[in-house]
Image (cartoon, rainbow, N blue to C red):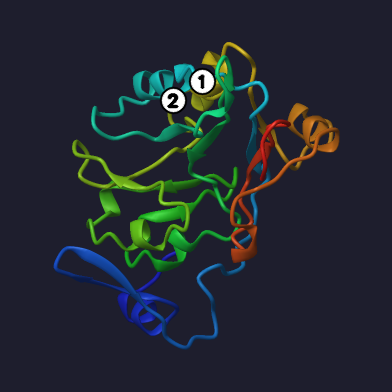
């Protein structure tokens, strides 16, 4: 979907940059940032099992290598909790931070050039590098704060489920292939017989910030020892 500058400024949430800090000015609009977007033939999603994750970060390194992500920025992070318990019985909880590939993606809504878009065939939220003008609107609009400027391409960047690399070759995303404990499950949410739907149907899951109406497609199986 394209969005003109006039439509953006008159719409929901003009982002104003002052002294290098992005602030949001809420304005009245018939549309909210999380507006309705059609899903594709496929609807790719991911599950992160916090019980299986050991925080090894093999996923982050595989992502960097396969997608040529420059040093200093990252498409995904594994966040480690504060230590829990008392020595010597101390453990941690690990959770994934990356693009949620929202069905209702605020970043797409605010992009004035159409650089941020949702792929019609897969539901993957992606970026047209050649259309990005570096305005930073999408970075400010993302409630998950997972977008960044790529210092090589000079455009907004984020996880794309390895759409241009592994997926294009018929493989699983690099993070999924590299996980030694099988903590990541990827697949088509529109396929009722897919592995990801089997996992979702047989495990308690949660998603981050669902109250915003973004409909994220990154699901998490909560750590049984922790709290949501």
| Along the viewing direction, whichever of 112 and 198 lies nearer the viewer | 198
Question: Residue at left 19%, top 36%?
Answer: 152
Instruction: Name the residue that disc number 1 marks.
Output: 169
> Does 177 appear above or below 212?
above
Total marks placed: 2
> Residue 151, position in %: x, y?
19, 39
Farthest left residue?
19
Local crowd at mark 2 within 10 Å, few (<14), some, or many (≥20)? Answer: some
Asked which secondary structure carries label 1, the reply is helix
Left or right? Give the position of 85 relative to 155. right
Badge 1 density bin: few <14, some 14–19, many ≥20, Cα 10 Å: few
Q: Is residue 161 visible?
A: yes
Residue at the disc numbered 2: 165
Residue 93 drawn above or below residue 125: above
In the rendered view, would you say 158 is above or below 35? above
Proximity of marks 2 and 1: CB atoms separated by less than 8 Å: yes
In percent of width and height, residue 191 lies at 78, 37
- Foreground residue, 103 or 139? 139
> Relative to residue 197, is residue 9 drawn left or right?
left
Label at residue 55: none
Residue depicted at 49% across the width and 86% down the height: 29
Q: Is residue 197 left or right of residue 127?
A: right
Residue at image coords 28%, 35%: 73
Helix, strand or loop at label 2? It is: loop
Task: Give the x, y percent position of residue 139.
Answer: 35, 56
Quarter of the picture holding the C terminus: top right
Q: Taking the image as drawn, is residue 171 in sight?
A: no
Q: CA distance from mark 2 to mark 1?
A: 7 Å
Residue 11 x, y percent position in the rendering = 43, 81
Q: Residue at x 64, y 49 (%)?
A: 40
Residue 150's quadrant in the figure? top left
């Amino acid at each position: 979907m394209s969005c003109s500058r006039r439509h953006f400024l008159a719409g929901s949430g003009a982002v104003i940059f002052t002294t290098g800090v992005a602030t949001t000015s809420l304005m009245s609009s018939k549309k909210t940032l999380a507006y309705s977007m059609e899903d594709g033939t496929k609807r790719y999603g991911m599950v992160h099992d916090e019980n299986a994750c050991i925080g090894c970060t093999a996923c982050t390194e595989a992502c960097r290598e396969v997608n040529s992500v420059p040093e200093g920025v990252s498409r995904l992070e594994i966040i480690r909790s504060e230590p829990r318990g008392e020595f010597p019985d101390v453990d941690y909880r690990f959770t994934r931070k990356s693009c949620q590939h929202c069905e209702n993606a605020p970043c797409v809504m605010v992009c004035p050039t159409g650089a941020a878009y949702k792929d019609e065939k897969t539901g993957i939220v992606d970026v047209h590098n050649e259309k990005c003008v570096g305005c930073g609107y999408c970075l400010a609009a993302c409630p998950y704060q997972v977008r960044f400027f790529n210092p090589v391409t000079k455009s907004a960047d984020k996880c794309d489920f390895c759409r241009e690399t592994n997926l294009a070759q018929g493989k699983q995303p690099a993070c999924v292939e590299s996980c030694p404990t099988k903590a990541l499950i990827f697949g088509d949410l529109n396929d009722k017989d897919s592995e990801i739907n089997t996992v979702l149907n047989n495990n308690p899951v949660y998603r981050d910030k669902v109250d915003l109406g973004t409909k994220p497609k990154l699901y998490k199986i909560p750590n049984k020892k922790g709290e949501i």
